[in-house]
Image (cartoon, grey):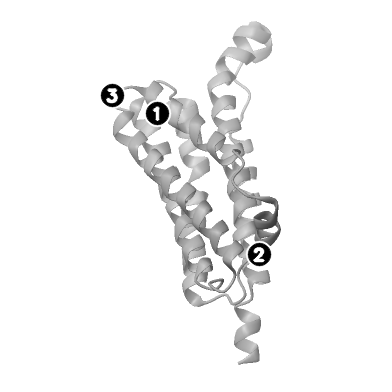
């Protein structure tokens, strides 16, 4: 039993997840390649204008991955026993997060293509659904703590809302790419709104 508990520890899950997320960010930044003949065409036409869509998409994805990493550490910090359900839910989450660099590169290379926005929104919706599931599993272990339960409910509602908005961006991308862009901006802004009282924050940490 002691060996099983050591193998299914939150520390190992968090360490593995941190490594995967670090690789995801590394892959994303490697996609920021300088355009050919950038020096010959000047700073504006050779570098800034060709790189602007890619850099904007990279910055957005970096912010989203950073939010996911912070929230992942917060939710794992509330887990006492890592069940197999939590491990596999975490793997589900990391699978979709690992596709963020692919969807980011697709959108950065094709900033006017509705398909690129639909793929980006779909991947983010799936990743957020992974967070909602992980939060729900973690909440089942903290039923005796009222403050912690409130934190779980609040963040889970945010995750479900984010999932719904990203899912809505998939069909909306074919109506207007600007509607999808509004959603991509609104969701991370939503996660920066104050949602915890000081006591609840301490409980979550």
Residues marked 1 and 2 touching at CB (< 8 Å)? no
Give the structural element (helix, strand or loop) at label 1.
Answer: helix
State which tag comes first along the sequence, 3 or 1: 3
Task: Give the labeled residue for mark 2.
Answer: 77
User: Would you name the residue on which mark 1 appears?
Assistant: 180
Return the mark for residue 175.
3
Q: Looking at the image, is 32 positioned above or below residue 194?
A: above
Q: Can you give x and y, in whole percent of width and height, for residue 102 in the image?
A: 48, 41
Is residue 148 positioned above or below 155 on the image?
below
Which mark is first along the chain, 2 or 1?
2
Badge 2 or badge 3: first in the primary sequence: 2
For label 2, the SS is loop
Query: What residue is shown at x 45% (from left), y 26% (from top)?
Result: 182
The spot of residue 158 in percent (x, y) is 48, 47
Tell me the mark number nearer the camera, choosing from 1 and 2.
2
Q: Which residue is rendered at x = 61% and y = 64% of the image?
A: 76
Is residue 175 at least partly visible in the picture? yes
How many marks can you see? 3
């Amino acid at each position: 039993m002691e060996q099983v508990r050591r193998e299914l520890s939150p520390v190992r899950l968090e360490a593995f997840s941190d490594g995967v997320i670090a690789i995801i960010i590394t892959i994303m930044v490697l996609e920021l390649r300088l355009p050919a003949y950038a020096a010959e065409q000047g700073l504006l036409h050779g570098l800034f204008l060709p790189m602007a869509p890619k850099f904007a998409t990279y910055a957005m994805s970096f912010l989203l991955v950073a939010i996911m990493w912070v929230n992942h550490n917060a939710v794992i910090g509330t887990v006492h026993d890592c069940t197999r359900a939590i491990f596999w839910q975490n793997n589900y989450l990391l699978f979709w997060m690992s596709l963020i660099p692919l969807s980011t590169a697709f959108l950065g290379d094709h900033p006017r293509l509705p398909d690129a926005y639909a793929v980006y929104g779909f991947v983010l919706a799936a990743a957020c659904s992974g967070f909602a599931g992980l939060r729900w599993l973690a909440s089942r272990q903290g039923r005796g703590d009222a403050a912690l339960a409130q934190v779980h409910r609040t963040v889970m509602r945010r995750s479900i809302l984010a999932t719904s908005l990203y899912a809505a961006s998939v069909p909306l991308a074919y109506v207007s790419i600007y509607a999808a862009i509004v959603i991509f901006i609104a969701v991370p802004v939503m996660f920066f709104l104050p949602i915890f009282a000081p006591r609840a924050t301490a409980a979550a940490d």
